[in-house]
Image: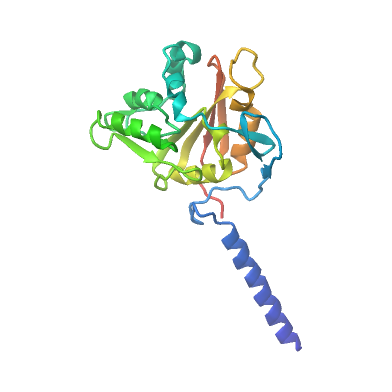
Amino acid sequence: MTMCATKLVKNMQRSLVLVVTSVAAITPFQSRSESAVSNNTQCEYVALKTGHPDGILKQYCNRQIAKVMGWQGASWLDRAERESEERTDQLIDILNVKPGMIVGDIGAGTGRLSMLMLDRIKPTGQMWAVDVQAEMVGRLKEIAQKYPKHQFEVKQATALTPNLQSASLDMAIMVDVYHELEFPREFLEALLVSVKPGGTIVFVEYRAGDPKVPIKRLHTMTVAQIKKEASDVGLVFEKVVSDLPWQDVVFFKKPLLTKK
């Protein structure tokens, strides 16, 4: 083979490697221009042969994923004691949602918190109540009928995506939801696409390791674990508020500039 031919083959091989690498970096839920996903992936899935009975046999980022609390437990979400036990009124203050914002309540459940947030963002704001369980979606649609058109919108999620439009949310909030996601990385990547550049994603999770928090272990998370998993997909840590009796409120920003 001549020297010129050898150089041509090497250039073709280099181009092929670049094309394959670029395609592999794009998930089904994002375009290259939308991606804010980190290239330094540290978190991985591991199938478990045995595990805690409150979880599924799947581990992510060294954390066993918890079983989803089914729609049958909706009465616990709406219990009269919730406001005093969890201080949901204080949570809404901490979130600091403003009139005119477009907010996604991801894993909205019975819609209780969605309605509280909507009170702060209406009349010009918009609430997107999202849930994966059809029974909860049905309840949310009943709530939506009580509001003006397009003020309270409902979306059926899947295990992989919230099914929201790209760059549509100013803020996305997951209240005691993230630890139950079957595909946390893929779902968070898709949610990231749904948030505007510079927008906010908030994790509200029961505080792990606190004896005063009467919640099963797999349904709690440490702030360090939340930060590790969120930063792994490109979210930028902003702050943590630990003023609530049982929960930590952890704020992240979607970068203004996306990864290329």
Query: Does residue 127 appear in this view?
Result: no
Query: Which residue is nearer to you in this view: 60 or 128?
Result: 60
Query: Which residue is nearer to you in this view: 105 or 181?
Result: 181
Residue projecting furthest to the bottom: 2
Q: Position of residue 87 (x, y in %)?
A: 47, 14
Where is 236 relative to 54, above or below? below
Q: Quadrant of the N terminus?
A: bottom right
Query: Does residue 183 appear in this view?
Result: yes
Q: Which residue is depicted at the point 47% across and 46% down? A: 193
Where is 75 relative to 53, above or below? above
Q: Which residue is depicted at the point 35% across and 25% down? A: 115
Q: Is residue 41 left or right of residue 32?
A: right
Where is 158 relative to 224, above or below? below
Q: Which residue is depicted at the point 35% across and 37% down? A: 154
Query: Which residue is nearer to you in this view: 107 or 199?
Result: 107
Where is 26 relative to 135, above or below? below
Q: Give the image's coloring scheme.
A: rainbow
Q: Quadrant of the C terminus?
A: bottom right
Q: Is residue 230 left or right of residue 104?
A: right
Q: Is residue 205 left or right of residue 43?
A: left
Q: How many marks?
A: 0
Q: Position of residue 73 (x, y in %)?
A: 46, 24
Quarter residue 219 falls in: top right
Q: Position of residue 90 (x, y in %)?
A: 45, 16
